[in-house]
Image: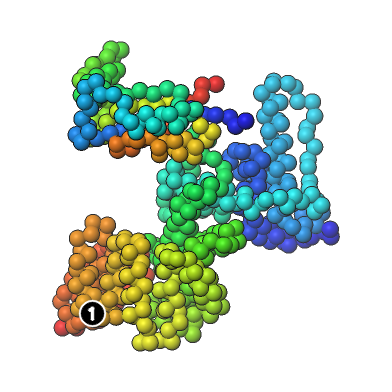
Amino acid sequence: MPQAASSEVAAAVAEAHRREWAFVLAATVRVTGDIDAAEEAVQDAYASALSTWGPRGIPKNPGAWLTVAARRRALDMHRRAATAQRALPKLLEPEEYLPDDADLEPEDIPDDRLRLIFTCCHPALAPDAQVAMTLRLLCGLSTADVARAFLVPEATIAARITRAKKKIAAARIPYRVPAAAELRERLDGVLSVVYLLYTTGHTAPSGQDLMRRDLAERGHELARMLRVLLPDDGDVAGLLALVLLTDARSGARVDEQRELVLLENQDRSRWDRRAIAEGLALLREALKLRPPGRFALMAAIAAVHDESASWSDTDWLEILGLYDLLVEKWPSPVVKLNRAIALGFAVGYAEGLAELDALGTEPQLARYPYLAAARADFLARLGRSDDARTAFEEALILTENDTERRYLQTRLSELTG
Amino acid sequence: MTKMSKYLVLIFQDEAVTPQAEGESISASYQEFMQRRNGSLLNGAALQPASTATSVRRNGTGGFSVTDGPFAESKETLGGYFLIEAGDLDEALEIAKEVPAGVGVEVRPVRVVS
């Protein structure tokens, strides 16, 4: 292999970190059977890549190089620990192992990442911990990065991850893909974690910007990884379709001043046609599943918007029909709220408003800003300015995202009468 | 040969709904479960109702305070337990799901003293 410049090496290691972390870690955990030891070995492998890829050249398959290096490092650490335990004098410094391209073991490596994600998303772990573990172990984010992603103190995330790792070891949460009989149920939990990561990034619950691109991208990457690992699963296809069909519009959701632009006013020429085409193909596959899963139904709703030439061309009756199916499958208050909005556009604002008012008793929606915002919008469209004003003010109190807050303030100031 | 772990399966029930009859024999559903999972069950027992419980706490000055009632007051009370052996948590949960318990069960790994 030819020598490489240090800037090239740094870029290659950074790229390998982003793309291969889960692959390398997952393959190493299988050898160590211990997540902590594997993480340490993988970190060492990345460090040794930084120092050796320069003089020895960048390997053709960085992931495999790193995997071999991490596994050797793990075995080495294990041997040293065993030696220390036997209280024997250390006679030799273990030689440094450096793999080359010939060392690759193709085996069942895709399965390793599946094992890792099913372990991270095991229902015996708290939901918060599932998300933190997935970001840490599958995406390779540092504890500090995970903390920044969820705007909580680093110590909180560190404690959450430590507790989860302790439980994995003490309760012996297995490192394996669940048996066929249980796969469906368990996969749903995995898909929910990935979807949560994506939606948290798509519209940040708080902060200055509407979106958290970093989180949305991690969710996107994880959905894609699952698709590679489970190419025949309709729900996985549905989730990736949903992510693609939603993400395709993200470039048009804010204007140059980073202000919110509603779907109604978006410049549709800025939508990502390639993402839409890929999402539509996946959606067709996901809809073969009978009955279609919740992600496929949500993707189908996104597809109706993506395929409409304009807001006024939108087939709201079809969207309403899809929401009816979705409510049957997944009767959450948020889904009912979205159905009520679709009803408003499909049938009439007054009918939509009546449904929204009925949802006012849902305890889960009591602090949800979008119920007040949707009521405010319909009241404004119906010309009931005083009531709309009250509803916008309520939404403003509940919203913690600065971009959404500015949008609501603008709408409030535009009310007349 | 997989290394086996021990788990305590704590059985919770709602006493208001299912008062324990005096001297009640083991129900048919429990007998069936115990036969089916015989190989994994190490030990187990049903408990007298929570109203018969007595709590013993350290009083902080070297002595004890003894009071009537269970340690933690809740609507669901501990009704019995099984000590089981399983290869990992998933296997333990499979067994736990088969326990014909009223409210549900809690699965706790038994600490291994090294």
Q: Is residue A101 left or right of residue A256?
A: right
Determine the residue positioned at 77% across, 59% down. Answer: A60
Measured as percent of width and height from the top left, residue A412 is found at 24, 76
Q: Quadrant of the C terminus of chain A?
A: bottom left
Determine the residue positioned at 33% across, 37% down. Answer: B104
Measured as percent of width and height from the top left, residue A177 is found at 56, 48
The amino acid type of the residue labelled 1 equals Tyr
Res A353 visible: yes
Disc 1 packing (10 Å; few <14; some 14–19; many ≥20):
many
**A359 versus A302 height, above or below:** above
Q: Is residue A359 left or right of residue A267?
A: left
**A303 versus A165 height, above or below:** below
Please identify the quarter of the rendering in which residue A199 is found. Answer: bottom left
Number of dots carrying numbers: 1
Measured as percent of width and height from the top left, residue B112 is found at 51, 24
Identity of the residue furthest to the top in this view:
B63
Q: Secondary structure at mark 1?
A: helix
**A145 versus A198 height, above or below:** above
Determine the residue positioned at 36% across, 62% down. Answer: A329
Q: Which is more toward the observer, A357 or A390?
A: A357
The type of colouring in the image is rainbow
Measured as percent of width and height from the top left, residue A181 is found at 49, 49
Res B69 visible: no
Q: Chain of mark 1?
A: A
Q: Is residue A294 left or right of residue A394?
A: right
Identity of the residue furthest to the right in this view:
A2
- Mark 1 sits on what residue? A349
Q: Quadrant of the N terminus of chain A?
A: bottom right
Please identify the quarter of the rendering in which residue A41 is found. Answer: top right
Determine the residue positioned at 68% across, 39% down. Answer: A74
Q: Is residue A223 left or right of residue A7?
A: left
